[in-house]
Amino acid sequence: MRNKPWAIDYLESNAHIVDVNNTYSKKIKTFFDKDQPIHIEVGTGMGIFITTLAQQNPEINYVGIEIDKNVMIRVTEKVLELGLSNVRLLLLDANTLMDYFNENEVDKVYLNFSDPWPKVRHAKRRLTHSRFLSSYKQLLKKDSIVEFKTDNRGLFEFSLISMNAFGMTFENLNLDVHDDEPKENIRTEYEEKFSQRGHKIYWIQASF
């Protein structure tokens, strides 16, 4: 996405929706109008997934985490357009999740079409690597779910091995989501694109 020099100024002008400067670190609940269960999406894409979920589930507070300020503009625009009071956005590096959240504060984590980082030397950057799983385990409440979708077979296989080695319990595995698509599935913009190219979509739901 093309760089927008005005991106940070725009995001800061919408500080009621976007936390650019870690203002709500360790106090994310105060960022919302209501005290409700918290679900987070690590890597929002253009925001279709999180805004659709928020519309469907007004009784849940959703936190979208994105490191790219230019992408975050698109998500912010969607939240504003839909007038969603149960979505808040963090311009945040996923490596710093536990610096931001408290332990046992989150009820669910979503990982949708994360960067596969295909080179072996970059494995630690994958969002299902054990170092990230360790963070999710700390911030999630007991028996909470990590939900993961990808079109990348290599990342899917890596994630299965990583989650299994970490001792997670697989609640659901789907090797071709669109073959018999669950009605609760929300197609992200990347999911639509990859599916149209003939890619299978893989889905994992696992708990600690």
Image (tube, rainbow, N blue to C red):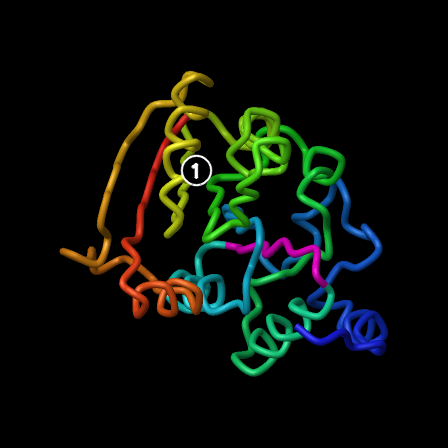
Q: Quadrant of residue 134?
A: top right
Q: Nearer the viewer, residue 16 or 126?
A: 126
Residue 93 lies, in percent from the top left, at 72, 47
Q: Quadrant of residue 123?
A: top right
Q: Is residue 66 left or right of residue 161?
A: right
Q: Is residue 204 left or right of residue 8?
A: left
Q: Is residue 130 left or right of residue 29?
A: left
Q: Quadrant of residue 208?
A: top left
Question: Which amino acid is tagged 1?
Answer: Val
Residue sitting at x 46%, y 53% = 113
Q: Is residue 75 above or below residue 201?
A: below
**What residue sits right under mark 1 in the picture?**
146
Q: Is residue 130 above or below residue 119?
A: above
Residue interval drawn in magenta: 61-68
Q: Nearer the viewer, residue 32 or 168?
A: 168
Q: Is residue 105 above or below residue 195?
A: above
Residue sitting at x 41%, y 65% = 188
